[in-house]
C-alpha cells in the first residue's frame, strides 16, 4: 500500500483499487465507490463515505473492516 501511495504522488497516477476492506480504501483513496451486486450503492469522498455512510451495505463493510483491523481504529484510517 505504501508503494501505491508513493507512485500516486510521484507520478500523479490514478488507481482503481478493488477491495471489501473500506478502512484500507479510505486510507489510500480520495474517492470511494461502493458496489453491491454490480450496482453502485454509494459514492463520495473517502472521508465522507467512511464517516457518514448512507447505505446499509456500506455500513456493514465499514464495521467488518474495523473489526478485522487488529487494533486499528476508525480515526487511524482517516488521518
Image: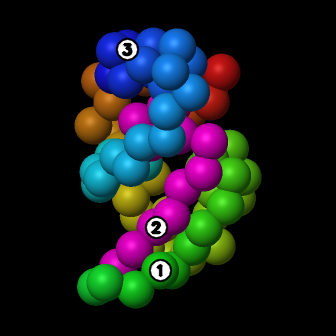
Asked whether 24 or 66 is in front, the reply is 24
Q: Among all residues in the image, which is located at the extreme front?
A: 11
| Horizontal side, residue 65 vs residue 59: left or right | left
Q: Residue 39, percent across and down?
A: 40, 86
* Cβ atoms under marks 3 and 2 closer than 8 Å: no
Look at the picture and state if 12 lies above or below 44: above
Where does label 1 land, which residue? 40
Q: Residue at x 62, y 30 (%)?
A: 78
| 10 Å crowding of disc 2: few (<14), some (14-19), many (20+) | many
Magenta stretch? 23-36
> Which of the two labelled residues, at mark 3 and mark 2, occupies the earlier sequence position?
3
Q: Is residue 25 magenta?
A: yes
Cα distance in 3D space between marks 1 and 3: 27 Å
Where disc 1 sits, the SS reads strand
Q: Quadrant of the N terminus?
A: top left
Q: Is residue 43 magenta?
A: no
Where does label 3 land, which residue? 2
* Cβ atoms under marks 1 and 2 closer than 8 Å: yes
Q: Residue 27, percent across and down?
A: 51, 31
Amino acid at each position: 500500500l505504501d508503494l501505491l501511495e508513493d507512485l500516486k504522488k510521484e507520478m500523479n497516477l490514478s488507481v482503481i483499487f478493488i477491495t471489501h476492506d473500506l478502512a484500507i480504501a479510505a486510507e489510500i483513496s480520495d474517492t470511494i465507490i461502493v458496489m453491491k451486486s454490480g450496482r453502485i450503492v454509494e459514492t463520495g469522498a473517502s472521508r465522507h463515505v467512511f464517516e457518514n455512510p448512507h447505505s446499509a451495505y456500506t455500513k456493514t463493510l465499514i464495521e467488518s473492516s474495523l473489526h478485522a483491523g487488529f487494533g486499528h481504529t476508525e480515526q487511524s484510517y482517516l488521518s
